[in-house]
Amino acid sequence: MTSMRDNRDIACYLVTKVSNWRGNYKRVFSVGTLGISTYNPNSLKETNQWMYSDFVNIVPIVRAQESNEFIITFRKSGKKNDTMKFSSEHRADIITEALRYRGDYAETPKPNLRYNAYKLHWSDTRLPVLLEVGPASLDQVDPTTNTLLCSYDYKEMEGFVKINDCTGGFAVVYGGYGRQHLFAAEKRDEMLQRCVEQAADWVGLPLRSVVSLDSSTLQRCLLGKYGKFSDDVSLTSMAEFTVQKISPRHNNEQIRRLLCLTETCLIERDPATYHIVTLRPLSDIFALIRNRDNPQSFTLEYVKGQVRSYTSTNRDALLASLLDGVRASGNRGIHVKMCLTARGHRVGPFTVPVDSDIESLHLKLLSQPPAGYTYAHVVDSFNCNVSYSGLLYAGTADKAIVAALVALLSMEGDQDTTEPSELESQLHAFRRLVASKAGFQALTSLPQFRDKVGLKVAKALKRNDASVAHAAIDMINALMQPMYEDSELRQEQLNKLSILSSKSFLGSLLDLFTDCVLNDRGSLVISALLDFLTFSLCAPYSETTDGTQFDALLEMAAERGRCIFKLFQHPSLAVVKGAGMVMKAIIEEGNAEIAAKMQDLALAEGALPRHLHIAMFTMSTDTRLLTNRQLSRHLVGLWVTGHPTAMGLLKRIMPSGLLTYLDSSDPVPVSEADLMHIRDNLKLAQDQSRKKNFLQWMDLEKQLESVLQHWSARIGLKPKPDPVKPIVLRKRRQRIKSEANWALFYYQFYQDHARPNLIWNHKTREELKDALENEIRTFNTDRDLSSNCVISWNHSEFEVQYTCLAEEVKIGDHYLRLLLEEDETEETSIIKRSYEFFNDLYHRFLLTPRVDMKCQCLQAMTIVYGRCHEEIGSFNDTKYIIGMLERSTDKMERDRLLLFLQKLTLNRKNVKEMMDANGSRVLVDLLTLAHMHTSRATVPTQSNVIEASPDMWRESEKEWYYGNLEKERRGPFSLVEMKELYDGGTIHIKTRCWAQGLDGWRPLYTIPQLKWCLVASGAAVMNESDLATLILNMLIRICEYYPSRDADGAIVRPLPRAKRLLSEAHCLPHLVQLLLTFDPILVEKVATLLCLVMQDNPCISRLYLTGVFFFIMMYTGSNVLPLANFLKYTHMKQAFRVDDARSTDIMQQSILGHIMPDAMVCYLENYGAEKFAEIFLGEFDTPEAIWSGEMRRLMIEKIAAHLGEFSPRLHSNTRALYQYCPIPAVNYPQLEEELFCSIYYLRHLCDTQHFPNWPIKEPVKLLKDILDAWKQEVEKKPPTMSIDDAYKVLELKAAAGGYDENKIRKAYFRLAQKFHPDKNPDGRDMFEQVNKAYEFLCSKSSKTGAGPDPQNIVLILRSQSILFGRHKDELHPYKYAGYPMLIKTIRMETGDDALFSKPAALLPAATELAYHTVNCSALNAEELRREQGIEYLEEALSRCTAMLGAGSAPGDMVVQVCTHVTKCYAVAAQFEGCRGKILEKPAIVKELCRSLFFKHLTQLCTIAAECVSAFAVDHDLQTRMFEAGALYHLLLFLFNYDYTLDEGGVAKSSDTNQQAVANSLAKLSVWALSRLGGYLSDAHATPHNKSIQTAVEALLTPYLAKKLSDNEPEKLLKILNSNTENPYLIWDNATRAELAEYLEVEQTRKIRTGECDPSYGAVFVFSVHAKELIVGDVFVRIYNEQPSFIIERAKKFTIDLLEYLASQAQYLYSLLQLEKSGKVPDSSTRLRQVEMALEALRNIIQNNPGVEIQCIGQFRLLFCLLRLNGCDRLQQHALEVSQRSTSVTSSPVKC
């Protein structure tokens, strides 16, 4: 029977024992090979053991999903079962491990269910398998051998995915990263459900519900088979190694595999198919096992327990690469060892760190080993439970760490005889301990620690065992570079100072390094030693190395430079990177001799092409590869810097155009992060010096020092120096530093280029890559074949030939094809040595006889000179080029020469050479060819403009003449006919020809048009328009070189030569006539050139003779701004009118006066070119501009008709010259009814509806211009010449409708030539008559009628009214000078019998102007009076008011006249002199009041009411208006007021709301009444008029009459139009109706008969008021009913009551006595009034204390009333008054 003594722990876990009697306590739960054990975690002593034969079961307690408890059941003695309960967060792991031995349990388990299935194998085959659903896993069993192939533990499962398009298909999602294992089972759903149940029942895991998605197809599952590592980055290999896999599944046979290292994974691939066999994340690798016995064998251990074994011929290189890759992925716990890990020594799974208690326990056991355990076992257990990266909980275990280190050194045993595996384990333990802060500091803090460690390492290295050596050096590295966070640079400096102090130790390390490299072994040792050198020599780590030690070690490393270069061929990326870092440090910080030696070795060892290949062709996202690429780029830069041989090699390898980027200063569009210098030591040093604790400690020290300072000073102690020294870093030396822009070079390397100096694309990059790879491969082969000899690379003969560029023509460093094809608008490449290159091109141009080659050279010269003209300077053969251009007969050559000349103009000296060679004339001759370009796009309406008639082309084409051998003149011929003659041999190149415009007979080949149309050959580069554009640009640039004014603005004389040449007769007309091409670009360029040429040019006054203004105005395009600039500068400077040269009228001075409307010419002159261009192109109908597209078309048609056949002639004869002829004035139908004055169209200016408040810029000037226009209009006379007379002079017969302008122009031309004084000396008089007749017919006067135009006068009058109305302040200081004409107009119109039937009524406009002038200034009012304007206005008013009636409308002329005259009188009444005139004319007041009668004319009534207010300033005028019945009219307006409109809050306007007008009139009427009666005071006061006030009080009641003085019309009007009853007023509908009836009757009588109430209403009494007792304007009855009503003047009212009683008492007494005797009628009415008076007296005394004092002296009256017997109420009231008076007056009272 097997005993537990042979049991071996397989998996151990820290658990909590749940005990009811003892409580919970910790135990180590172990699953072994023979049974289950528990241990005390503090002593590792066994507490319980159960062999599997006694073990019954282990199950989870499923209370809740988060429960971690489980129960084990076991047999005790007597076959009784007992249980124990445990709890652990690793419950699933524990149960899974225990259930693996379920077959050995005491109770035989039930057999597991099996299902037939097949697996989708990695080889794309379907492999039959049995799937067995076990208690802890889903097992895959071989159906043939019944062997277990693999198990899928439930604890590692993420779930299942059903595959929809595969029968029975599903995927097991396993491994924690979404890895899918694909199967198809017959009973899929049953099996999956069984798995879910088993996982829940046995392991306590609720497997995720079965996933079934519509998108879960087989294809999708295959694509995502490897979970999150299915992307290309995770599957792309960075390094591949061929291995033999030892697979237990294949009976431990070796199977060939490719082991591929990617950025995140380790992949096994089948080398035959490259299919992925397995894929595992690098983070899952736990350890790399390097078999000590077999030099090719190694094993990979994974954290989840898997173990995979392999063999490889290059094992150590593979392990070095794998070690670097795993660490780069973030797995810092990876390490290399020679023995498999004893997994039973670890307490917990390898997937997570151990508990802190476990770590502390094993740390403690190192210094206090437990009994029964060997020290090797303790060390091995420590290594198993502590990560290779160091202690996780080392922060509080400093003492324990130190104790462990001391124990390791003391218990290490005999280092000479210790087993290598045990020694390696000890070194690994050291590595784990010194990775902590306390362990790192122990090197310098523990006594003799350094010596002991050094001795241990030295002995380990002498073992000549690569595994031990690697462990020893890796431990030293951990002491060189801290592996913990928050490391201190000071301690790092101390450690390095200690380790590097032994030169012999360093020498032994470097000897070991050399031996491993030269013998091609020990890759792991090499990798560790490179790390050692990196931490010592390479930045940034080298900054903490002592300077002396650094220099010594650097020199020792440099001596082994060839070994380092050899490592660049190493298969491990880690080794290559380490060698590169060391090489970088040697070159940068070594002396010049060392650096030069390394640069030479880089070439000799072939390192430069290798690293160049890495630098340029490494494409990856992996940080390691990118770091290597960055390092290679740095090394290449260092090797090339200052080394001509290396730079020469680069020039032979790569194009010079690419290498130019090295010298560029341009920034790099995309920059890379620095992956080599990842630590900023300076910042770390500063941060550590500023730590909070450190600062607090320093503050405390300073405080203590200050306390002790006084005492120490007294006893004479010197202060101790500060023991804390600042951290001093070694300053890096960069003796060789590349200044080249390598970053930009590499960026541009990856871009495609097609430039003159560089062709670079995918093909060239591939050719370079292939060349480098072939050279490297060849060199490596040669080196391998000559292993006994030192081989050096033949770098001097290496050169890369780019076959894809073999067919490109290259001159120097430039490709001619691309230089010629390059777009000048794009960024161009830099041309080096441009002067030499240009001369080479020119030399080739001169030598080659081929025209096409000449053209290519010219094109290249054009490009080069255009870019580098400053470097090349002036071109000495410019004259020769001009001569070639003049002699050339090839169109391509001509165009290339022109393009070259255009670039030559960039240099001013070349321009002078061109002018000296008569280049201006040659260029202008070529310009004329633009007329022959017939295929250009036509501008709209252009065809109609050019072709005046259908048959004009045929008639005007025949322009050419030639002379034959007999010198006979033949012709005319058309251009087409000339070509036929030339083709037929009738004429040849020397035939002399002539046409209009030529300066004489010339050989055919010297006439540009004939030469290029008949003789020339070749294909043109540019069409005629482009050629002309080019020439114009040249001429513009030439003119810009020679300005017409100097820097001080002085005019340069003589005129600059360039402009003088272009102003000559053989150039200027042809420049101008280019406008007739109507090409937008040409027109714009010509306008620009003409502006430059004509600036300050003496010839500008005769420019019009070229027809330039006709041609410009014919242009139909929209790019008119240059044309407008030209017109602005020139149109007023033309000498086309000798007799009117001094005229100030713009239209008389402007050459455009006959062509354009007045407003457009004024716009051009006053507003500038920009504004003119805007108007010219738009549609405007404003007071300042009336212009439209239709008007523009009309103008163009008129000009085209005037030019006639000249435009088509230019197609046949480009040298034809225009003969100037003035154009008849263009009449625009749109302006027939317009009157233009100053800069405004008066009709639009007066149209206030469409143009309200149009801005008037200079009102005073406009007023003067209008007065002048008025004067001219009034004095207008018919022209001295009639149209018939003009026709007679031009020998034209009179015809109905007249002649068109074309016939008039032809007649003028014919007679002008006939009688011109130069040809006919006797015809001067006739010549002048012909000119006069033609000018008359061309002028506007021939089309205008005789005499003044009433419509124009109306516009003039209304314009002045607008001026005075809007600009009163500006015109106020000026006296109006137009009164004589104005008064005359008013007088004439008033006396005209046809006044009311005229189509153009002047009187309304004239009277309105009279009002505005008077309203503007007092000076004007006085002037109006002196001019008898008051009298004439009265006549106009009387005549118009007589025409007013019920049918009159506000817009009627009579109403307008009355309104304006009334307003004028209202303003004139302000002035005393005018008031005197008004008093002299009684009819004025009468007509004014008559105007108020027509209440439907509310506007007129409003003005009249204002006029009444104005007249009220004079007492006599008040009386006149009172007697004229003004009160009747004004009072009636008061009752039309609606107070609800004003109080309603609704927006209102007098234009749309009639009630608003009525309300306004009512308020004005109140104002007029207030002023008319003199009720107002202060500034509005008028004379007091008693008569008027009496009448107003009678008509409105005294109470309302008093309200007129309050100046609050709204309140008064509201009372008047409301029903009110109070002691002061009884007012209701009856009173209003009674008053309105009276007013209407009297108003009508006064208007119709002139008679009315003699009292004018002063005796009017309301019927309802006649029945009331009124005392002191108070209705007594109403007061008695409202005794609390506040009486405004209570004292006066009291006195009035007493006076009334006194007047009635005696009378009443006598009346009562007579009544008793029966002699008189009843006196009850009088009695009731007295009673009311007494009652009112009582009430006033009662409610107004103090007034009773007025009763003093009146008691006799009261007593008298008491004696009236029979009058009980009277007596009672008298008694009450007496009582109240006496009761109050008994005490002093203040009144």
Image (spheres, rainbow, N blue to C red):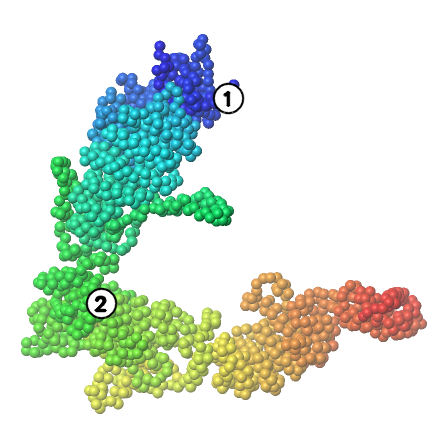
Dot 1 alpha-carbon crowd within 10 angstroms: few under 14, some 14 to 19, many 20 or more: few
Q: Is residue 1562 left or right of residue 1224?
A: right
In what quadrant of the picture does the N terminus appear?
top left
Q: Residue at x 22, y 25 (%)?
A: 294
Q: Residue furthest front?
A: 715
Who comes first in sequence, dot 1 or dot 2? 1
In the foreground, 1320 or 499: 499
Query: Where does residue 1391 sit, x and y in percent of width and height?
Result: 52, 85
Q: Is residue 468 left or right of residue 1406?
A: left
Query: Where does residue 818 sit, x and y in percent of width and height?
Result: 18, 55
Query: Where does residue 1461 sit, x and y in percent of width and height?
Result: 55, 80
The residue where tag 1 is placed is 23
Helix, strand or loop status at disc 1 = strand
Q: Residue at x 92, y 69 (%)?
A: 1763
Does residue 934 appear in the picture of this structure?
Answer: no
Q: CA distance from mark 1 to mark 2?
A: 102 Å
Depicted 1323 relative to depicted 1229: above or below? below
The residue where tag 2 is placed is 906
Q: Residue furthest right?
A: 1717
Helix, strand or loop status at disc 2 = loop
- Res 1274 quadrant in image: bottom left
Q: Residue at x 33, y 71 (%)?
A: 1192
Q: Is residue 1449 left or right of residue 193?
A: right
